[in-house]
Amino acid sequence: MSASETALQILSGTFAPQFHTNLRSNFSSICCIKSRKDRHDGNYIQNRVTRNLDGLFKGEKKNSRSESLRCKCSQPENNREAFLEDGSGRLVNGLANEFNFQNVELGQPLKNENGTLLSNDGLTAPTSNIFGANSIEDEAWTLLRASMVYYCGNPVGTIAANDSSNSNTLNYDQVFIRDFIPSGIAFLLKGDYEIVRNFILHTLQLQSWEKTMDCHSPGQGLMPASFKVRTVPLDGDEDATEEVLDPDFGEAAIGRVAPVDSGLWWIILLRAYGKCSGDTSVQERIDVQTGIKMILKLCLADGFDMFPTLLVTDGSCMIDRRMGIHGHPLEIQALFYSALLCAREMLTPEEASADLFRALNNRLVAMSFHIREYYWIDTKKLNEIYRYKTEEYSFDAVNKFNIYPDQIPPWLVEWMPHRGGYLIGNLQPAHMDFRFFSLGNLWAIISSLATTDQSHAILDFIEAKWSDLVGGMPLKICYPALEGEEWRIITGSDPKNTPWSYHNGGSWPTLLWQLTVACIKMKRPEIAEKAIKVAERRIATDKWPEYYDTKGARFIGKQARLFQTWSIAGYLVAKLLIDNPNAANMLVNVEDAELVNAFSYARTANPRRKRLRKGPKQSFII
Ligand code: GLC
């Protein structure tokens, strides 16, 4: 197929992802070129045209997805002094001890007193006492700006951590999609839209990257887990270098985990960008619409699954290591549900077929029914499970998934308060993962995947279990930790995920922003305010760690990075939203009346009769 035929398909909305590899291989890599001689003043002298159409960042609505594969990188005057390289090809604004933090302006690159830009090399990030009277928030803003990554002189993201005390960088010098979300929201809340727009459009380019692992290619809608800006020598020209965006789709990640959450977060951020900036031209672009549809196509694809929830492997989200969350983990389901609602709002009728809207609606109804009914536990439900009959072969089975009551863990019987409840971590045939996972529960509130009553009950639960879930630092990623033989078998004896550390019961300050959005949505901001106060006691003096260890979050995590960007941004978003609660609407999905009707129909329908008779008039299929 020729490029023009492909473009025609894109235009007509019949573009099929399998052609994308062909399309991509016709083009060379995304890059900006600069002369080596001119590297030090950051003056790009040449712009290699790698895609056939112009103006990606000029805001025009374009005709083809292929045009998004070219970046505007020729802005020598604007970009002069925009950044320095750190020697590894990474372009970040670094920090220096002698830096005058008082003089930082929003969105400006960091400079020392002589006005020279700062490099990240070998420099120590500041501690809070350097800031003197400056508030924790000022420090956080300075650090957040210092984490900005530039590509062709334009800000495109924030690095995961800016911790010069740790020589083992691993991939913490990359821009992670999930980690950028709180950064992006913080920038949006400050009215700094450019970085978010660039991030959205550049990661969209990466979506169509040729990706393989041992000769196997995952679906074309997959978004990378992270990317890095590299400066590489230009073939055939010894004086020139080029910048390239180098994505990791999991093919280099520890454990080769697929970042299922990336595309879902991308859709959620895209909607937030439009709502906050008022600029809907980005979501209306045909390449962006195609990007949304490619993600949906991947998520809505038929498989062998009996459940409406998304089936994924272990480690496919924030918990990106083996932690026994393969199957249908709550976090992915809540993000999926939210992304479906956001996509439905943004897809233009010209771009999305009636079939796609129908598929979206059907999945939304089926998912909300499934999660609300089968993932929910509180004392009453626990007692029901305790008395379950098993081996029921019938359409009317009460214990549909054949859960053996002995699975109820002894800790839960003691732990479950009389008031409150939560959505369990995972549901599979004959298996309920009763652990409490914070992000999934919070995003279930935010996305209205949980009912209003359930949402309040989850917050009641967090309040009732404050010392376990918040303790010395909000918020525990999951509760309880896997210990002993369970830890050995389920994590594969993972030394990073030892009990009450990291993903296994560690406490992650970044979760503060999601807690805040959920509390604001339920008009209970005082819970978030209390958690923010707990964080403020130590987060800055502890140098913004990635996570905390021990049951009560007493220690900075064993292998935690310091100056972890999403800890910084998460705190800022929480503070900004408490001051301006209405802004949380850009992240919240309000429950849809049609879905509520379909849901109550599904609840009252007898499963056997439902197979025979017609559904409600909206034609939702459950
Ligand atoms: C760890 C976390 C992951 C995060 C990454 C970068 O791998 O598990 O969620 O995206 O670090 O901060």
Image (cartoon, helix red, strand yellow):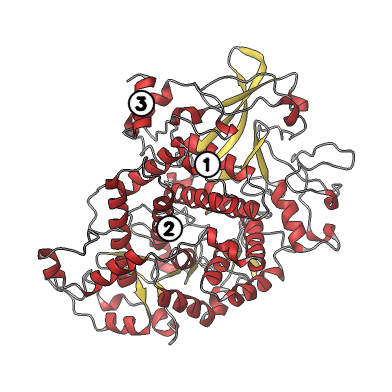
Report helix, strand or loop for mark 2. helix
Q: Earlier in the sequence, mark 2 or mark 3?
A: 3
Q: Earlier in the sequence, mark 2 or mark 1?
A: 1
| Residue at the image point whose x is 44% and y is 68% from the top | 484
The answer to whether residue 171 of the structure is visible from this angle is no
| Residue at the image point whose x is 84% and y is 57% from the top | 130
Image coordinates for residue 53, horizontal then vertical, percent: 51, 23
**Residue type at tag 2:** Ser
Image coordinates for residue 600, horizontal then vertical, percent: 28, 72
The image quarter containing residue 591 is: bottom left
Q: Dot 3 corresponds to which residue? A: 8
- Could you tell me how far apart the alpha carbons at marks 1 and 3 are, in whole angstroms? 21 Å
CB under 8 Å between discs 2 and 1: no
Report helix, strand or loop for mark 1. helix
The image quarter containing residue 411 is: bottom left
* Residue closest to the eye, 425 or 448: 448
Q: Dot 1 corresponds to which residue? A: 281
- Could you tell me how far apart the alpha carbons at marks 2 and 3 are, in whole angstroms? 31 Å
Q: Residues within 10 Å of mark 2 (few under 14, many from 20)?
A: many
- Could you tell me how far apart the alpha carbons at marks 2 and 1 are, in whole angstroms? 21 Å
Instruction: Kindly give the residue lying farthest to the bottom in the view shown.
Output: 418
Quadrant location, the C terminus: bottom left
Image coordinates for residue 319, horizontal then vertical, percent: 47, 57
Q: Dot 2 corresponds to which residue? A: 338
- Front of the two marks 2 and 3: 3
| Residue at the image point whose x is 33% and y is 57% from the top | 327
Q: Earlier in the sequence, mark 1 or mark 3?
A: 3
Q: Residues within 10 Å of mark 3 (few under 14, many from 20)?
A: some
Q: Is residue 288 left or right of residue 187?
A: left
Report helix, strand or loop for mark 3. helix
**Residue type at tag 3:** Leu
